[in-house]
């Protein structure tokens, strides 16, 4: 039986996992797809580097074009990450009729539509299950599992690094900076953590999820992004007192075919299933008009979980090839997107204000809310940081983001309000 | 464009939901599959019955063969439930080249292999996502999402009725009989609740999940079943004191290609994600060698969630038909199963014993455990039901089921042990 020949781009953590699964589960894989799967060439940065697994060195190459132009190779598995020239290699590989499996969220979030269009033109598969939420098969679920439903909300904890940091801050009372250092020491956070802690990584993943869930042409710039570097230990304590956990949530919503997408630290009611997702785990909560509430939970990263998704995609590519139906997923039809305005984006909010400690201040604040038709749900006055200032914790009922911003602008101008300390979205 | 013609068997809760989705989402569905989907005939018990949705009465029939033999019909969607003559209709429909979408767990658990063999022979699709865990796309996940992995454990809360009852007992301190009556009044439990409360419904679903997850020919008789009718309020209180929730868990395990499957009330550590699944919700926890821990959560029943799974299957059938690749899922290869013996089935256990209140009794018990090489993790003596008897709560370390049974048999013969009140499996 002629083996299916795979060219692997990248032999880091995930690439090593892919080799392990393809070799270790060869018999199971073969019984599913009907022929052996062979990794015939591997692109590496340095052929001479020592590796944790044994690889025949004749398979290693430092030249990507050697793989792209090899007519024997059927599928390219790309697990290098980053953009660089990767788009160019992939477009050329598709041009030559090779199928693609990738774990590259940056590539798919930024250039997904161009790549899928080329794949469709060439009748090739492009699968990218591992690009979002590592081992959780959420992309398949959105494309196939809920094909009959109309999804109206997707909420995701899709970045393990920030969830680890927030979990540690919540459970151990540690400060952001200290936990970040610990996460870096453990290898959960990069030396330059910007992409994770500022929410950019999560934004890329939410772009992919919203595109699939809403079947709309969502772009990375459509995501309103805020990271966790401003989350304080105090915010977390107050959230807990009110029955919430602080999570970096990606939230994509659709109403009457208008959509909004954001990534921001959010206070999530403890009774919500996503509030319990802790440590480096990921979860994606999906609300469909017909199905109602569902949630998918699992490891968001790591060698073997991510490699599982990659190799499951590889199995799907090989099955499609045998059936002669490649290029089917790429031809999903997408709607033009319409973005919600700030007037249409609504949620409940939490505000922490520092105000002067004198009578009449709460009345002033209440008047501002009232003028903007925002309704207060609760007010608490827990502590006095210094003698002249008190803290006010306010939760509101549903209001638009535009309304909130107008109220906040007015607070900025009130002398009695010394500081708007924190503002969070609330999810119940 | 020629519409795809569907014959619907059953117009109860789920059938009504299927009609609603196919009509309400017609435009979305058509854009996915490229042609209209029409429900052209519906099998009902009584054509003259009043319905909650408007149906053209000329579509209704009381004769199943009218649908099975209609050459115009491409797909049969079976949502009647129960067995009756359904297998006969389905085999005949497959013989005539019709594809099948079914929500029927009884049918698939008892006759799945025969039906799938016929489908494979005829090149027809048989999809049954709705047969397990309603709106959760767990069957797709096991077949495709984890195709590259080796699944070693599946744990499921796959019966909403019993989870509702146990949740109420746990949260409100109510007695089993009272909550059962309430569940019956709310329509969550049948007038004859046997199939739910005795674990038979869950056993059928676990048969289906284990077959797919382990790719082995599992039969319903392989499942060791115990229901929840013996779960007392006291058991739940003691579980909570020890940090556990009592759940009716289906547990399928595989080790060295030997498998075991059971459904039983289990004490699950509160930190386990499945312990938080409450009310009528379902969840399936899957452990794969490579992916590690994952969990899939959602509504286990109900008109619209179940109908979502049915119509998503229908979309898959129509797509396969357009591509000419029907019958692909049916041809999964399955291994012969080997069942674990009681010596190989291991877990931790909880025991509640009523023993005489005199010195030396605990030593006797400890000797029995020691003789059978079972190791005690903790002993508690919380209360005295009457003057001469004390309660002992014992948790053990890992032991085989056979070892436990030998120890229990010896306890039966000890005069100091008045009663073995409860025995539970523990999951952490």
Image: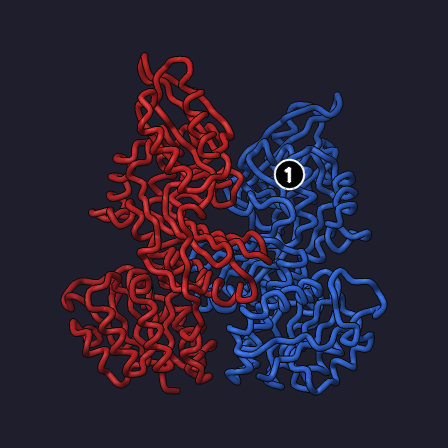
Chain colours: A blue, B red
**Which is more toward the observer, B190 or B237?**
B237
Q: Please, is residue A199 above or below residue B98 in the view? A: above
Taking the image as shown, residue A323 lies to the left or right of residue B51, namely: right
Q: Secondary structure at mark 1?
A: strand
Judging by the rendered image, the residue that carries numbered circle 1 is A351
Taking the image as shown, residue B79 lies to the left or right of residue B363, namely: left
Give the percent coordinates (x, y) of residue B40: 27, 77
Q: Quadrant of residue A380?
A: top right
Taking the image as shown, residue B176 lies to the left or right of residue B85, namely: right
Which residue is painted at 19% across and 65% down in the image? B84
Which residue is painted at 58% across and 66% down in the image? A25
Q: Please, is residue B396 above or below residue B12 in the view? A: above
Which residue is the extreme one toward the front?
B371
**Which is more toward the observer, B14 or A252?**
B14
Which residue is painted at 29% across and 66% down in the image? B111
Give the percent coordinates (x, y) of residue B153: 49, 53
**Which is more toward the observer, A285 or A260?**
A285
């Amino acid at each position: 039986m002629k083996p299916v020949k795979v060219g692997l781009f990248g032999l880091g953590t995930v690439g090593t996992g892919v080799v392990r699964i393809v070799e270790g589960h060869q018999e199971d894989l073969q019984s599913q797809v009907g022929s052996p799967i062979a990794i015939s060439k591997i692109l590496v940065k340095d052929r001479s580097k020592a590796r944790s697994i044994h690889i025949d060195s004749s398979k290693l190459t430092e030249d990507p074009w050697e793989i792209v132009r090899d007519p024997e190779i059927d599928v390219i598995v790309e697990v290098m990450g980053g953009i660089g020239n990767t788009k160019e290699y992939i477009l050329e590989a598709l041009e030559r009729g090779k199928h693609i499996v990738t774990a590259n969220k940056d590539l798919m979030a930024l250039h997904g539509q161009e790549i899928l269009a080329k794949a469709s033109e060439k009748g090739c598969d492009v699968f990218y299950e591992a690009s979002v939420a590592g081992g959780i098969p959420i992309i398949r679920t959105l494309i196939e599992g809920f094909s009959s439903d109309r999804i109206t909300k997707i909420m995701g904890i899709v970045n393990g690094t920030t969830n680890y940091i927030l979990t540690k801050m919540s459970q151990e009372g540690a400060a952001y900076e200290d936990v970040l250092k610990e996460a870096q020491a453990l290898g959960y956070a990069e030396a330059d953590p910007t992409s994770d802690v500022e929410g950019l990584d999560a934004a890329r993943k939410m772009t992919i999820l919203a595109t699939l869930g809403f079947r709309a042409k969502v772009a990375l710039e459509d995501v309103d992004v805020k990271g966790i570097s401003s989350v304080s230990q105090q915010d977390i304590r107050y959230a807990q007192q009110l029955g919430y956990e602080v999570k970096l949530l990606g939230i994509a919503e659709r109403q009457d075919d208008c959509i909004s997408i954001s990534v921001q630290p959010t206070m999530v009611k403890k009774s919500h299933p996503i509030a319990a997702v802790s440590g480096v785990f990921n979860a994606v909560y999906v609300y469909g008009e017909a199905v109602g509430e569902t949630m998918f939970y699992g490891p968001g990263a790591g060698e073997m979980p991510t490699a599982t998704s990659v190799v499951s995609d590889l199995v799907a590519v090989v099955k499609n090839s045998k059936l002669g139906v490649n290029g089917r997923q790429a031809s999903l039809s997408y709607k033009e997107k319409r973005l919600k305005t700030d007037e249409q984006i609504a949620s409940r909010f939490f505000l922490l204000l520092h105000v002067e400690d004198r009578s009449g201040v709460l009345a002033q604040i209440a008047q501002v809310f009232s003028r903007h038709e925002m309704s207060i749900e609760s007010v608490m006055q827990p502590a006095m940081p210094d003698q002249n200032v008190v803290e006010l914790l306010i939760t509101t009922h549903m209001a638009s983001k535009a309304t909130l911003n107008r109220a906040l602008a007015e607070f900025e101008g009130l002398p009695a309000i010394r500081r708007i300390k924190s503002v969070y979205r609330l999810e119940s």
